[in-house]
Image (cartoon, grey):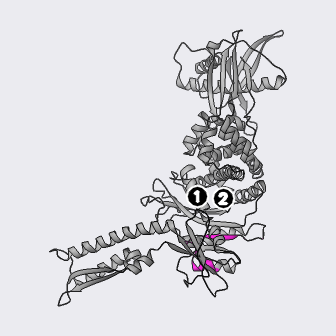
């Protein structure tokens, strides 16, 4: 066995390049012949003695021989890589030439049995099946993706779902730990870190078309029709300054990371939990301003049916509600202000079993809108705790201000003290209106001598009561039906929480705008596959978290067993571990075969 270096001319340019091949010599009746075992490519930067050492080491690995001499790390790494590739190629050839019905028995030495090249395949196999159901490979081909682009796209998406990490860590996972290379029949050893960055750029360039396609594909595969859309925003923080990213701005961080620049993700999710549309926005974007453009994207669909729009209070401004009415959208939203009336149409009734919420419609002469009064036990408990906390903070500040009047260097000017009280009331606006505060001036009116305050219990009770209002233009629905319809807003909140905690959406380590957007987009694509799995399980009454499914299937691996045969040769047997009890439950529910690739065998 040796490595041959061949010069290959380029006819277009007149130049040439070198290609390296692993070659085996053998004798025939007509004399010695050479057989190409493996093409090693043009990028083998080794001297002639090193090429000989590499060929010898590959042969030693195949025959299960431990080298007597120290091997250079680079040579050893390449030898392990090419020996693995050669074994896969030889086992494929053996499978093609040997009929399926042939049963063979071999005698091996048990003391020579070793396990090598373990790779996880359980969750990868499941996600590839889900991607196949959505015909993602076919769609990538229609968009002009090459075979390498398709393999890398699926690897980036599936990698985010199983092992959410940086591109560098994902590349290591693909080449050292995952069996995705075998499942896709693509060698990720030949890819670089730059390929993973560029595939994110490519997926981002086709975002709009892929988003529309997946929205329709999910409806076809799962046979549902979307009648409702839930829209909300969240933000995620970035490591570094991200000065080259216009969207990276400082704002109100959901994770309280006000020291980091932010980017905002807007999602439109249907009532089944699938993402219909998404947008990537500046970190300091005003929530209400984003609604109209995002909802208009939904009108690009050929379906003339307009879904019900569900919004939280942050987006449900008067202007946005007016726009929804003008464009014939039905909606149900959390009100930003109190209802015009407190007179109820009937008695409060439970919104549902174990909800702890009571609801009733409010009497109104308005023909366009209906208002819903909601009382929540959980909200009352939170409000009670908040009331105590706000009171303590506000009164503590008042006491400090009062004490400063008796200190020699304290600010005592009457007009300035009034300003301080005004600023304090503005800062603690949730409870300050429930207090009567008096600043007593001196006889000449120049200085403040004392600050007194009195709590107004009726105001405090009203201000922090555990109730809220919903407003809607939906008719012919009862109060409990309306509340349960609005409660679907938790679906989008759960999606945000899941993406951040389980799909590595935060923090963002990229600095360039397109790379940040690509990071968010790959997260959404991974969410598509995961939600497809969870939705199907839920439809069958199986309610698992994604982490549970991922952990249960992670024990399924593909491994190579090697042993010395009676004839002194090396037997290589590569197979996947068998599915067990709880794993079989997942496969049975999803209608997926537990068989992961066929067994491969070769004798060297």
Q: Magenta: predominant secondary structure element?
A: loop
Residue at x-position 76% and y-position 70%:
305
**Picture layout, residue 223 above or below residue 160:** below
**Any mark on residue 273, and which?**
2
Residue at x-position 72% and y-position 47%:
131
Q: Quadrant of the C terminus?
A: top right
Residue at x-position 61% and y-position 21%:
54
Q: As drawn, which residue projects farthest toward the bottom?
A: 444
Dot placed on the residue nearer the N-terminal end, 1 or 2: 2
Residue at x-position 17% and y-position 90%:
443
- Residue 532 on the magenta segment: no
Residue 293 on image: x %, y %:
64, 71
Number of callouts in the render?
Answer: 2
The residue nearer to you, when weighing 300 against 193, is 300
- Residue 321 on the magenta segment: yes
Q: As drawn, which residue projects farthest toward the left?
A: 408
> Would you name the residue on which mark 1 appears?
494
Residue 104 lies left or right of residue 20; in this view the side is: right
- Quadrant of residue 21 within the rendered picture: top right
Residues at discs 1 and 2 in contact (Cβ within 8 Å): yes
Residue 75 lies left or right of residue 37; in this view the side is: left
Is residue 262 among what the camera can see? yes
Boundaries of the magenta span: 300-322
The residue nearer to you, when weighing 103 against 382, is 382
The residue nearer to you, when weighing 17 against 210, is 210
Residue 546 on image: x %, y %:
61, 47
User: What element does badge 2 sit on?
Assistant: loop
């Amino acid at each position: 066995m040796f490595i041959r270096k061949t010069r290959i001319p380029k006819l277009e340019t007149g130049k040439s390049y070198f290609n390296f091949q692993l070659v085996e010599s053998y004798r025939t009746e007509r004399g010695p012949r050479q057989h190409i075992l493996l093409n090693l490519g043009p990028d083998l930067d080794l001297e002639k003695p090193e090429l000989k050492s590499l060929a010898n080491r590959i042969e030693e690995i195949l025959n299960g021989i431990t080298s007597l001499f120290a091997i250079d790390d680079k040579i050893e790494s390449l030898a392990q890589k090419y020996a693995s590739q050669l074994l896969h190629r030889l086992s494929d050839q053996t499978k093609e030439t040997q009929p399926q019905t042939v049963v063979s028995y071999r005698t091996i030495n048990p003391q020579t049995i070793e396990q090598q090249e373990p790779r996880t395949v359980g969750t990868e196999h499941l996600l590839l099946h889900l991607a196949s159901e959505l015909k993602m490979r076919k769609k990538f081909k229609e968009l002009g993706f090459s075979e390498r682009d398709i393999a890398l796209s699926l690897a980036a998406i599936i990698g985010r779902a199983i092992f959410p990490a940086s591109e560098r860590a994902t590349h290591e996972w693909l080449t050292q730990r995952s069996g995705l290379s075998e499942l896709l029949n693509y060698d990720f050893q030949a890819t670089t870190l730059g390929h993973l960055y560029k595939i994110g750029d490519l997926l981002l360039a086709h975002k709009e078309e892929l988003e529309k396609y997946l929205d329709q594909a999910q409806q076809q595969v799962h046979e549902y029709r979307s009648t409702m859309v839930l829209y909300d925003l969240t933000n995620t923080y970035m490591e570094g300054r991200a000065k080259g990213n216009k969207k990276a701005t400082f704002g109100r961080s959901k994770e309280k990371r006000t020291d980091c620049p932010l980017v905002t993700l807007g999602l439109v999710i249907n009532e089944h939990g699938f993402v219909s549309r998404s947008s990537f926005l500046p970190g300091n974007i005003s929530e209400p301003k984003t609604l109209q453009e995002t909802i208009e994207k939904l009108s690009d669909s050929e379906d003339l049916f307009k879904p019900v729009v569900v919004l939280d209070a942050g987006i449900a401004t008067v202007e946005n509600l007016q726009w929804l009415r003008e464009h014939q959208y039905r909606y149900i939203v959390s009100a930003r202000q109190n209802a015009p009336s407190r007179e109820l149409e009937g008695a409060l009734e439970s919104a549902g079993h174990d909800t702890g919420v009571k609801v009733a419609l409010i009497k109104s002469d308005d023909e366009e809108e209906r208002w819903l009064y909601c009382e929540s036990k959980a909200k009352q408990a939170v409000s009670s705790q908040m009331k105590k906390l706000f009171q303590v903070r506000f009164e503590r500040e008042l006491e400090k201000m009062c004490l400063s009047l008796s200190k020699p260097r304290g600010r005592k000017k009457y007009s300035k003290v009034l300003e301080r009280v005004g600023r304090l009331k503005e800062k603690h606006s949730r409870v300050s209106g429930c207090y009567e505060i008096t600043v007593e001036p001196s006889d000449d009116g120049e200085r403040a001598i004392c600050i007194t305050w009195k709590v107004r219990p009726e105001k405090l009770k009203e201000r922090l009561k555990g109730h809220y209002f919903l407003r809607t233009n939906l008719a012919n629905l009862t109060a409990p039906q309306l509340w349960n319809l609005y409660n679907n807003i938790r679906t989008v909140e759960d999606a945000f929480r899941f993406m951040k905690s389980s799909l590595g959406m935060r923090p963002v380590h990229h600095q360039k705008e397109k790379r940040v957007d690509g990071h968010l987009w790959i997260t959404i694509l991974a969410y598509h596959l995961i939600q497809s799995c969870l939705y199907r399980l839920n439809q069958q009454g199986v309610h698992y978290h994604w982490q549970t499914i991922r952990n249960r299937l992670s024990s399924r691996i593909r491994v190579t067993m090697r042993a010395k045969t009676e004839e002194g040769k090396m037997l290589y047997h590569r197979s996947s571990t068998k599915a067990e009890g709880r794993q079989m439950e997942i496969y049975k529910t999803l209608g997926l075969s537990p068989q992961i690739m066929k067994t491969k065998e070769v004798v060297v």
